[in-house]
Image (cartoon, rainbow, N blue to C red):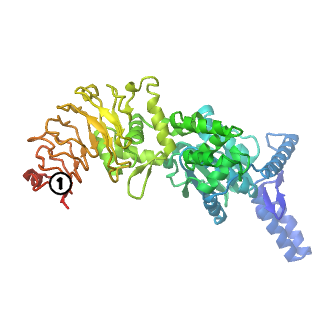
Amino acid sequence: MTEKGHHRIIPVFYKIEPTHVRNQTGSYNHVFADYERNLNDRLVLQWRKALFHAANISGFEYNHDHSRTESDFIEGIVQMIIRKLDHQYTNELRSPFIHDQNYACIESMLINSKEVRTIGIWGMGGIGKTTIAAAIFREFSPQYEGSCFLANVREESSRHGLNYIFNRLLCELLQENVHISTPKIVSSAIIRRLRRKKVFIVLDDVNTSELLENLLGVGQDYLGVGSKVIVTTRDKHVLLSRSVDHIHEVTEMNEENSLKLFSLNAFNTMNPHKDGYWDLAKRALAYGKGNPLALKVLGSFLNSKSEKEWDNALKKLRRIPNADIHKVLRLSFNELDDAEKDIFLDIACFFKGEEREKVARILNECGFYADIGIRNLLDKALISISTNKSIQMHDLIQEMGHKIVCEESLKNPRKRSRVWHPDEGSATIETLYLDMTQGTEICINSDAFRKMPKLRLLAFASSGIGYGIKRVDYTLSLPTNLELPNNLRYIQWDGCPLKSLSTTSWPSKLVELSMPYSNVEKLWDGRQNLPSLEEIYLYGSRQLIECPDFSGAPNLKSIWLNQCESLTQVHPSVFSLPKLDFLAVYG
């Protein structure tokens, strides 16, 4: 089917081969020979050109050896026309859609290209990939001879198999029942028909590159000139193949569009004027952080509720995340392997905002293969890297990570693997992150850490995201002899109030020690066996008077001793460290 002005053309080849029409051979040759003798040459040339173009349009073929009866053949034509008309008028009944920069970017790619193009739409769960693809499909598909929107490819292929999905695609594009036993073997007749047809395809929520290749082929070599394919996915790796021409990362909605979408669902209008709800709406927008799914779900839930109920619901979200939102976000987490899940949870509960290389170095020592693991988290849009090379994570995704940890033991926090409250320690804990900016009073008894043999990461943090220490008053009671678990890889102790840690038993697996702005005068006595230690950060520790002996840490690469005003000299062992490439002293 093609368009001519406001008309659509469907060629029907009744007992004739399209090649005879295209080339005017066979009986057509004899007829045109008579025409050329008796009619105007220009008129005959126009007829030849029209038949050539008609034969290149995908239509219906009926031959004597056709497996269908003539009545079935005619019924197929009628049903196809009905579906096309139905599709045309259905597309005019659009649900409200907010056009933003994401839509505009993809739209420009489609308008400015006349070649076969495949565009990937990638982003975190709930960011609006499917909604954008649907809006684009509604806008552009009527301009094409065939179209197909395959929704939930991940789920449908898992439930029904690849062959079912592929046959659905062919049936939609050819507008007739087709059965192919495997996508790897397609008849030449079907391929010829598809190559003559300009189509618009959307493959929604594709989760593996193998699935994409089976549905499209390795180069879309069966699609007609001008065809367009849109693929939505949470995993960028799916799109990193030669069959995808451009990848668009869907960004969060800006504040103006977020308010419009939320208001549409909460107040049934994009321009709310309800007194008393404005401050509540701002709280809801702050929670959604530009994620369309969160804004829709939250807005729909709060619709028709009283101000008191709004306030109560928003307070509840601080402790109990919305189940509908987290169900969608969690799909990406569920596809991770065990090591990647550990990396994700460590970032969500401990390392958000820290430098990528630092996190990879520490988690590699935990046996998590963090370099490739972090790359996979990036591809699945679970994390991002900021301009200063730190790892960032959307608040909703971090909230999901916290919820996953809480689910390890709903009733007993002491049985969870990762803790961010000081009263939840136990033998199962792997990471402990304490925010000291809250003026916390913490008492650690002599055997507290002995009860945490699995502890890998420990932080007494007062620096927010790791840049700039916030001076706070907090009470920390510690025993005389502090025994740290030998499994510890990372210690962060911002503004440590202790003057001496000389009696501390330092863990031999330690990779990094970060104690900026501490009151410590002396770290340890003599030589400590620290074969894995790579970085020591004592910046601004103005009371430090004795530089420790580093000879037991042969893998040290960087030492930060700047602004340690009371330090008069460094230990001679510093100058014999074979891998040291950075030393900051005094300045």
Q: Position of residue 506 (x, y in %)?
A: 18, 37
Above or below: residue 451 compared with residue 557: above
Q: Residue at x 43, y 45 (%)?
A: 376
Q: Position of residue 332 (x, y in %)?
A: 51, 40
Q: Residue at x 36, y 49 (%)?
A: 354
Q: Give whichever of 226, 273 is nearer the camera.
A: 273
Q: Is residue 123 left or right of residue 349?
A: right
Q: Where is residue 267 in the image (x, y as percent from the top left)?
A: 71, 45
Q: Give whichever of 577, 453 is nearer the camera.
A: 453
Asked if residue 95 can be seen in this view, the reply is yes
Q: Tell me the residue that label 1 is attached to.
A: 580
Instruction: Name the amino acid, label 1.
Output: Leu
Q: Is residue 343 left or right of residue 119?
A: left
Q: Give whichever of 542, 195 is nearer the camera.
A: 542
In which quadrant of the rendered view does residue 459 lie? top left
At label 1, counting other C-alpha atoms closer than 10 Å, the crowd grade (few under 14, some 14-19, many 20 or more) is some
Tell me the quadrant of the picture where the N terminus can be found: bottom right
Tell me the quadrant of the picture where the C terminus can be found: bottom left
In which quadrant of the rendered view does residue 584 lie? bottom left
Q: Which residue is drawn at 31% across and 33% down?
A: 442
Asked if residue 216 can be seen in this view, the reply is no
